Amino acid sequence: MHTERKARWAVRQSALPTVVRSCPDCSSTRHRPSGKIRVNANGKLLDVWLLLSCAGCDRTSKVPVHERVHTSSLEPARREAYENNDLAVVRELTMSASLAAKNDYSLDWSGTWELEARTPLHAIDDPTPLTVLVSFELPVPVRVERLLMSGLGLSRSRVRRMVADGRIRLPLAPDAKARRDFELTVHAPAATLAQLAAPVAATRREAVRELGAASAVEAPPRLSRAVSGA
């Protein structure tokens, strides 16, 4: 009996997304994080901004993170992270879809990720099902079909054919964009399973033939009892 094989694919971060918004000083719409956060205190009220740099003219612009919030509403560790330009917080804010929606800009995720795929050899034709856990290091929207092409090293047409044939089983459509962890299963083609079963069937047929031949051998004749005449 075959036991299920497992593999892990990880969507790794290679860069931060580009902020797409108009620049007041030039025609560029591309902005990158400057790596800095500005905190302004007015008594007990705080304003916090993420600072961006225009890719065209280097103009610095501000993205409101908190506006006129009371100091008590922020955890001390969070405020300290803002004041110290904590890189993890800069990364978090830059990738925040809710912050982008709140401030009416979009994120361009092109060139921000790479797939690390640890898949056993012969994963496609091995008769043992392969379960793949896809995990995301960053919330980048990636088309499922593209992940399959990269992870399995297959063309788009073959990936689509395998999905249609039920050999690749997914929890979402192949043209959907995923950004959270999910699992998929790769099954062997029917021809491979038939080839695997053929030797077993042949062995069984041979055993049946041998058993039949053995039962057909004549048993030794019985000795007849002598009947005496009257």
Image (tube, rainbow, N blue to C red):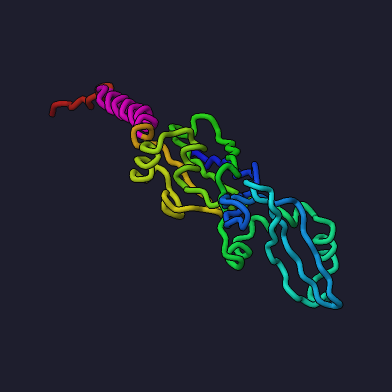
**Who is closer to the viewer here, 62 or 213?**
62
Q: So how many labels did they put on this image? A: 0
Residue 152 placement, left or right of 96 = left
Any part of residue 103 in sight:
yes
Q: Is residue 167 above or below residue 194?
A: below
Any part of residue 137 in sight:
no
Residue numbers of the magenta segment: 194-219
As drawn, the residue found furthest toward the front would be 25
As drawn, the residue found furthest toward the left would be 230
Q: Could you tell me residue 190's position as x and y percent?
A: 34, 37
Residue 28 placement, left or right of 213 = right
Q: Is residue 190 above or below residue 219?
A: below
54 is within the stretch colored magenta: no
**Who is closer to the viewer here, 143 or 180?**
143
The C terminus - image quarter: top left
What's the magenta bit mostly, secondary-structure-wise? helix
**Residue 106, quarter of picture:** bottom right
Q: Is residue 46 above or below residue 130?
A: below
The residue shown at (49%, 30%) is 122
Q: Could you tell me residue 195's position as x and y percent?
A: 36, 29
The residue shown at (31%, 29%) is 205
210 is within the stretch colored magenta: yes
Q: Could you tell me residue 86's position as x and y percent?
A: 80, 55
